[in-house]
Image (cartoon, helix red, strand yellow):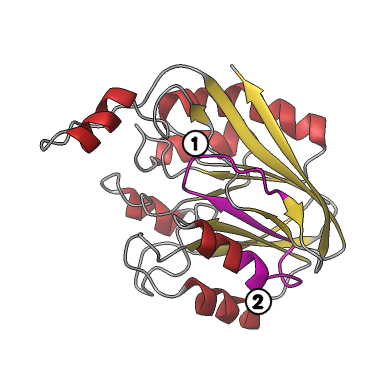
Amino acid sequence: MKILALGDVVGEPGRRLVEAFVPDLRRETGADLVLVNGENAAHGHGITDTIAREWFDRYGVDVITTGNHAFDVKGIDAYFRQEPRLLRPANHPPDTAGNGWIKLHTPSGAEVLFINLMGRVHMSTCDCPFRCVDGILQKERADLVIVDMHAEATSEAQAMGYHLEGRAAAVLGTHTHVPTLDAKVLPGGTAYVTDIGMTGPYEGVIGMKKEASLGRFLKVLRPRYEVAEGDLQLHAVLVTTDGRKATSIERIQRTL
């Protein structure tokens, strides 16, 4: 079984990369299911129902994960309630709109449990992701478990990888927008990477124009963030599994 996962899609440039490459990548890799983190898809902050529908209906995306920007777009909570394939972090408070996990079936009939988690270090207030995922796995059973760990701290992401070693087929980091070189399969059969890396414009600072980012470090008045425009790169990983465990994790990069 193969799972293709894309890191944070940033703004209109990131959406162009999804449109240009995801359908072909799905065919080329033989991916059974495709996961995309879409929390920055709308102008760099949040996601709209229009974007999500287009990805589901036209570009071969099966599940969309999010993170700390999940609800930035006004009114999106209604679509979270309506569309179970659009996930918000499972460790948000219990009364939060939407779902934190979903089970999907591959064309061969295998059941895959996708779980969206968010770290607590330097992030928005949320419940403990470690206890949260333990609770989910106590209740839910599937042939394969894939986790998007949306975390600021590399230590927290790595800790989650070891926490779920042997229980999840993959723990895939998102949020920092910077691809890391530590993609590997842990001894217990869990594919791991600290951050897949964003899908978007790499000419700026984590997808935003560098002038605004520099201004936030150098000035009292904080300039408004705007999505950068150049050096468009798609970053993804392809996880291959045998039964419940991963056998390989391969980095994929495309440029536009």
Name the residue at 64% across, 83% down.
138
Q: Position of residue 82 (x, y in %)?
A: 44, 55
Name the residue at 67% across, 29% down.
253
Is residue 168 part of the magenta span, yes or no? yes
Mark 1 residue type: Val
Q: Where is residue 241 in the image (x, y as percent from the top left)?
A: 84, 55
Is residue 253 part of the magenta span, yes or no? no
> Looking at the image, is 137 positioned above or below residue 76?
below
Q: Position of residue 39 (x, y in %)?
A: 43, 45
> Looking at the image, is 69 positioned above or below residue 117?
above
1 vs 2, front mark: 1
Q: Quadrant location of the C terminus?
A: top right
Extent of the magenta region: 160-183
Name the residue at 44% across, 70% down.
91
Q: For the view shown, which residue lies furthest in the front direction?
A: 218
- Quick one: 1 or 214, which is closer to the camera? 214
> Looking at the image, is 255 positioned above or below residue 99?
above
Number of marks drawn: 2
Q: How far apart are marks 1 and 2 (CA)?
A: 29 Å
Residue 113 marker? none
Residue 9 marker? 1
Q: What element carries label 1?
A: loop
Name the residue at 20% across, 33% down.
218
The quarter of the displayed image where residue 199 is located: top right
- Quick one: 73 or 171, which is closer to the camera? 171
Which SS does the magenta portion mostly show?
loop
Mark 2 residue type: Glu
The residue identified by callout 2 is 140
